[in-house]
Amino acid sequence: MRISALPLAVVAAALLVIWVLAAIALNWQVVADAQARTGHSPDWQAMLGLTLNHARPLLPGPHQLAEELWRSTVMLPVTSRRSLVHHAWITLSAALSGFALGSLAGIVLATAIVHLRTLERSLMPWIVMSQAVPVLALAPIVIVALGSLDLGDLWPKAVISAYLCFFPVTIGMARGLASPDRLSLDLMRTWSASRVQIFFALRLPVALPFLFGGLKVAMAASIVGAIVAELPTGAQAGLGARLLAGSYFGQTLQIWSALAMAALVSATLVGLLALAERLIARRMAGAA
Amino acid sequence: MAVEARGLSLTFATRDGPVQALSGIDLAIAPGEFVSFIGPSGCGKTTFLRLVADLEAPTAGELRVNGMTARAARLARAYGYVFQAPGLLPWRSIESNVMLPLQIMGIPRAERRARAAEKLRLVNLEGFARKYPWQLSGGMQSRASIARALAFDPALLLMDEPFGALDEIVRDHLNEQLRALWARTQKTVLFVTHSIPEAVFLSTRIVVMSPRPGRIADIVDCDLGTERPLEIRETPAFLAIAARVREGLRAAHSYED
Amino acid sequence: MSLLLAILLLVAAGFAIHRLARLEGPVLGLAAPLAFGATLLALWEFLVVANEVPMVLLPAPSAIGARMVASAGILWIDFNQTFLKAVLAGYAIGCLGGFLLALLADRVPFLARGLLPLANLAASLPVVGIAPIMVMWFGFDWPSKAAVVVAMTFFPMLVNTLAGLAAAGRLEHDLMRSYAAGHGATLWHVRLPAALPFIFTALKVNAPLALIGAIVAEFFGSPTAGMGFRIATEASRLAMDMVWAEIALAALAGSAFYGTLALAERAATFWHPSHRP
């Protein structure tokens, strides 16, 4: 998919303009009330400035958000309790551990499903149905249950992330492994290739694009999982914890900056996977 | 004149430079003629058909369809187009597919139904009105596609290799039926094909084209009479015309290298 | 002794499932997965009871079932709050919004080319994180949860509808052009029906997303009802049987929702090659 720069730039710029206008509109009433209480009634030019610089905005202006992000990342030492980098790392370490676990499990299970028909018939419907179960709703259960086993902070969150990753990776990998056409499979059979040989020579390379599709979804899901896992027990550290604390104490900028950080982290990691996907696709160019 | 082309040209701009799909085509087709277009790939026969249908625009020259510009003719729904594939919409029944152009033209339901039934009878598909395209064989789908092209009774029929994907016997059958249809309705037909026997069997005139640039190499008159049973394909007169067409084609192919 | 019996039964179940896996057909094909599920439930029950697993770690299926019956009233209230209000409203608005924007972007290709990369980017973001902000904007009650659901269901619908509108082939476009059909007629007769398989994919994908969105949004604060709210509060009180009861309810609701959509898909896209034998 070729990304054309001009339409993207225009739409992004338009969204930015909408953002600023919305910030002014949404913060107007709050600012007006605050001003009225102190006996001021500023003209609209002053109001513009005030709505875009309010301490607890309903919607911060882009520059406010950028400033807050800068203040909580670059301006603070990484080990500080208030540093967003510190919080992001806490969440990310759980997410990545879960991602590794879940993806591995998914790959293994997909391989098993493709080779064992019994497993496919009995397991696949449940795997599909597991998607209808709101997995994130299990977060409190897992946290409490594993918490009682005293595994520390990271592993309960990682388990939730792993569960969220496992489905897209399994489905993607299974579809990829099953995708070689009859022609290629028959050809390998005429060479008396063993199942292992067919797997490594044919199924695995063909499955890579599908696998990466699943990995991208899984990465985003594992980050969401780690964030949500921080909510039920009122964790003290991590991006989810920051979101929760911000909403409890009405620190709206804190909420927005935590969210922006989470979005940045997520987009970067998924972007890296997409890059890897494109490099692999280029190496395999011509292979179906 | 049903179709009149004068100095008609179409040049495509491609990554490897301009390609002259058609160059200086001069052709006049009278109403009621059955004209086949035959030639190697890239000779422009499909391009010419698409120009008549206003699915492409020429880069030079003049084209008149029923005395109007191609665009006006398209807006006036002067022709029915039959594509290389049946192109029936799978979510509509056969009857509903045939009614589609009538629906777009805003014709009321009762009349749509009646006309569709009539056209399906014409192509011997009555009884299959409620079936869906995938339930029909390739030959039947082609016939349904023709019925659809006839739905609003255009005077002009444009057919782009409609029987290409079918086997020999089915093809013979459909050729017979098309001939009978043409004799009965007296429409003007422009027919693109790869098959020499098909062209000679069906047409009153055969236009042999050659590529690079696309142009007319020869026009062969095909006066075998209006009554043409399939056996006519073994008569000397038929074979003579076919031989002439074949020679023209061979010459056209020799430009290909 | 009972352990030996359990192992034997497990092996027997394994063989049975292996045999059942050979059955074909829409009803018989369910035999293997059902047997598998039943075996899993039985195993769960056995392990929990035999090993006296504490309720806080994992309650037995029987305990969960009992709790569901005993607290049916509360379950209904939560279902009403979360599913009937937040999920359904958010799902409808989000899917409709994504669909309409896709139609607009289809009309204005420049917009489509600019939006598509952004929509794909949005798919990699933790959208559920806007829940506290929605609470700030819309209050604690269900509209803020519905807003989260709107945000989560909007982008998959947009992306899939755009992909679906591109699905109708060149032949179909030429056909409509030969009928001098306008943009609207072409959209209605050809492009929208051809897009239905893609649209239904998005509708199906959005169903669990909507449910998750509403429940998780409630983790961030909710009035005294709702499935997410109940899960969070009962979990903190260690009343795990109630938590599992709510999960089971959510699973049932999610499956029913998804199943209804799958049935609608079958009816609307019966003509697609993937549904034909």
Image (tube, coloured by chain):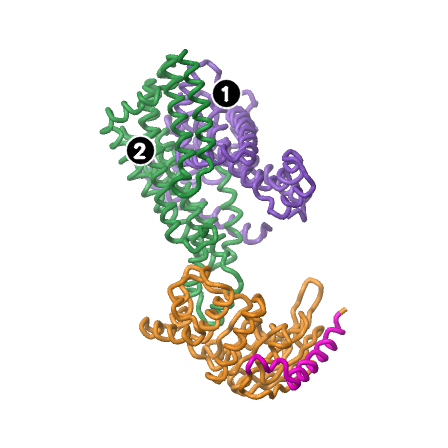
Q: Is residue B146 visible?
A: yes
Q: Which residues are magenta?
A: B229-256
Q: Which chain is orange?
A: B
In the picture, the disc for residue A154 is 1
Q: Quadrant of the N terminus of chain C?
A: top left
Q: Residues within 10 Å of mark 2 (few under 14, many from 20)?
A: some
Above-or-below relation of A54 to A89: below
Q: Is residue B102 left or right of residue B41?
A: left
Residue in view at x 59 percent, y 75 percent: B192
Asked whether B131 or A165 is in front, the reply is: B131
Q: Position of residue C231 (x, y in %)?
A: 34, 26
Tell me if residue B254 is in the magenta stretch.
yes
Give the amino acid at mark 2. Phe
Give the chain of mark 2: C
**Residue A207, placed above or below residue C116:** above
The answer to which quarter of the image holds residue C141 is: top left
Which chain's colour is green? C
| Quadrant housing residue A26 | top left
Identify the colour of chain A in the image.
Answer: purple
Q: Residue A229 occupies which quadrant of the picture?
A: top left
Identified at 57% across, 75% down, the residue is B49
* Picture residue at 53% right of the left edge, 47% below the top: C117
Q: Secondary structure at mark 2?
A: loop
Asked if residue B224 is positioned above or below residue B71 in the image, the reply reads: below
Per the image, the residue denoted by label 2 is C140
Instruction: Identify the chain of the residue marked 1, using the numbered disc in the image.
Output: A
Residue C142 is a magenta residue: no
